[in-house]
């Protein structure tokens, strides 16, 4: 069975009430003890004075006649012989059985104690002072006794204290319930609003309470997350629509060619039609491959990564390719990064493809360490990219006019993929200024700090 309440409000209220009851309970036990001790001490003092007065009188023979009573029957005093006969008493205690059966011995002549008789609800208790007048075997005993107030005997004091404890514990519970309710009110409002927000309507925001407290922060964070989510979903939609648009163009061309060929077989060179269809299919294939790659980047997690020497990787890629251009390389040793090799090869490949496509005569590839990072730059001496387009070219399917006039082969996804790879590796890819014309792409990645080996310890 589940004992803990589900709601924070109920749980906090229960905890506060239990703690209050415990603390107040301990305090009540203390009060009970203190009241009992004080009342008994007070009664005992009175009975002691009276018992001493009478026992003194009996000892020196100054007690004459019936014992006087200044307490108007509150304190009962009796002088009792061995054998239990009452020989003298205050008026209220005359004609009564001895108030106590306790008989002090000759070496412990004075005793004080509490004695009870009867059963609840008629139970009564007395504080008794018993003084054996002398050590002689036939000495009489003087008893002075006073009844304890009923609230100490019938549990009234404890009942009253328990009521007080319950009342205050209840008060604490009520206050906690109210305060927690008021505190959690905004949380409930946020929850309700969040529950209503769906992927199709991300424009709604949760109510933000004023102030700087945790709940206000929670609401602000939730809204910031919703902002990002809305932008991401917007980008995804835009991407899907761009992708379908981009795919539709070659499909339409392909279809038109095929339809024309099938309707006018005699007017068409079948071989040319098939070749054109193949080109369109190639283009479709490369777009789809790029789209799949884009969707996959960054999903492998850190386990797919390995330490890679960026200079070695660039060198291997340059050796693999045959250029008609002048290639200049500056490759520093040991520029190690963590990454997914095929992705970094792809990134560099995309930059080199573009450089090769746009360069006039030369390309410079540089791999160095700069500002504690690995820096790879690919610079060409082509038309370059206008400052206004420097961010735009990294967006999916962006192709500048220079590209359209030059080559129809590109998908417009190369730089988007390259930047996505850089970001998935914790780095950046940007276009940078440089002294001559042409474009310079700069990739920065976090360096892997390799532990330097310590020299062997000198022989002792
Ligand atoms: P693609 O090359 O397939 O068109 P990219 O994403 O690789 O797509 O490049 C986007 C656009 O950026 C290109 O179409 C071209 O207009 C421009 N661009 C890329 N690299 C260069 C470069 N080195 N010099 C001039 N323009 C470039």
Image (cartoon, rainbow, N blue to C red):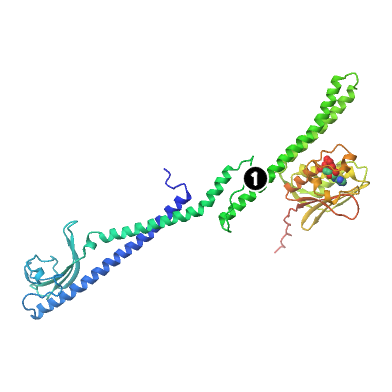
Check the picture and name the quadrant holding the N terminus: top left
Give above or below for 336 relative to 247: below
Residue 100 appears at what percent x and percent y? 13, 66
In depth, the one of 275 and 351 nearer the eye is 275
* 201 relative position to 177: left or right: right
Check the picture and name the quadrant holding the C terminus: bottom right
Residue 119 appears at what percent x and percent y? 17, 56
* 457 relative position to 359: left or right: left
* 135 relative position to 254: left or right: left
Residue 349 visible in the displayed image: no
* 168 relative position to 226: left or right: left
Residue at which label 1 appears: 203
In depth, the one of 123 and 363 nearer the eye is 123
Choose top left, top right, bottom left or bottom right for residue 152: bottom left
Give above or below for 173 relative to 47: above
In depth, the one of 221 and 207 nearer the eye is 207
Instruction: Judge the density around disc 1: few (<14), some (14-19), many (≥20) Cα neighbours within 10 Å.
Output: few
Residue 240 appears at what percent x and percent y? 73, 37
Give above or below for 350 relative to 37: above
Q: Residue at x 71, y 41 (%)?
A: 236
Residue at the far top in the pictured view = 266
Q: Is mark 1 within 8 Å of ligand 1?
A: no
Residue 424 visible in the displayed image: yes
Residue 18 appears at what percent x and percent y? 40, 55
Ligand 1 quarter of the rendering: top right
Give above or below for 62 relative to 327: below
**SS at circle 1:** loop
How many marks are shown on the rendered structure? 1
């Amino acid at each position: 069975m589940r004992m803990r309440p589900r709601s924070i409000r109920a749980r906090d209220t229960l905890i506060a009430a239990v703690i209050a009851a415990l603390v107040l309970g301990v305090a009540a036990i203390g009060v009970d003890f203190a009241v009992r001790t004080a009342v008994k001490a007070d009664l005992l003092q009175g009975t002691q004075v009276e018992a001493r007065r009478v026992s003194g009188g009996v000892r020196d023979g100054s007690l004459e006649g019936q014992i006087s009573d200044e307490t108007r029957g509150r304190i009962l005093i009796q002088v009792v012989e061995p054998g239990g006969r009452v020989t003298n008493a205050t008026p209220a205690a005359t004609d009564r059985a001895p108030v106590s059966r306790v008989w002090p011995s000759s070496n412990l002549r004075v005793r004080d104690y509490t004695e009870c008789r009867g059963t609840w609800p008629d139970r009564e208790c007395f504080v008794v002072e018993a003084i054996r007048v002398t050590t002689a075997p036939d000495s009489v005993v003087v008893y002075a006794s006073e009844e304890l107030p009923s609230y100490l005997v019938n549990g009234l004091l404890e009942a009253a204290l328990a009521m007080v404890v319950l009342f205050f514990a209840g008060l604490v519970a009520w206050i906690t319930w109210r305060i927690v309710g008021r505190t959690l009110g905004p949380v409930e409002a946020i929850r309700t609003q969040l529950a209503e927000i769906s992927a199709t309507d991300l424009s709604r925001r949760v109510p933000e309470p004023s102030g700087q407290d945790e709940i206000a922060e929670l609401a602000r964070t939730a809204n910031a997350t919703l902002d990002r989510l809305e932008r991401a979903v917007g980008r995804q939609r835009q991407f899907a629509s761009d992708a379908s648009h981009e795919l539709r163009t070659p499909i339409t061309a392909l279809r038109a060619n095929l339809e024309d060929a099938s309707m006018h077989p005699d007017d068409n060179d079948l071989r040319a039609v098939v070749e054109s269809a193949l080109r369109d299919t190639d283009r479709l294939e490369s777009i789809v491959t790029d789209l799949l790659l884009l969707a996959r980047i960054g999903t492998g997690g850190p386990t797919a990564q390995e330490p890679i020497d960026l200079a070695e990787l660039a060198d291997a890629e340059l050796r693999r390719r045959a250029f008609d251009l002048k290639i200049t390389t500056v490759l520093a040793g040991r520029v190690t990064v963590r990454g997914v090799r095929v992705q970094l090869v792809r990134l560099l490949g995309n930059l080199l493809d573009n450089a090769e496509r746009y360069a006039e005569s030369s390309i410079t590839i540089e791999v160095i360490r700069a500002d504690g990072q690995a820096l790879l730059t690919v610079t060409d001496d082509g038309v370059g990219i206008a400052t206004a387009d420097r961010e735009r070219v990294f967006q999916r399917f962006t192709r500048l006019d220079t590209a359209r006039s030059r080559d129809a082969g590109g998908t417009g996804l190369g730089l988007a993929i390259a930047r996505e790879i850089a970001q998935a590796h914790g780095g950046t890819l940007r276009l940078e200024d440089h002294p001559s014309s042409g474009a310079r792409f700069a990739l920065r990645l976090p360096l892997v700090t390799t532990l330097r080996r310590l020299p062997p310890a000198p022989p002792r």
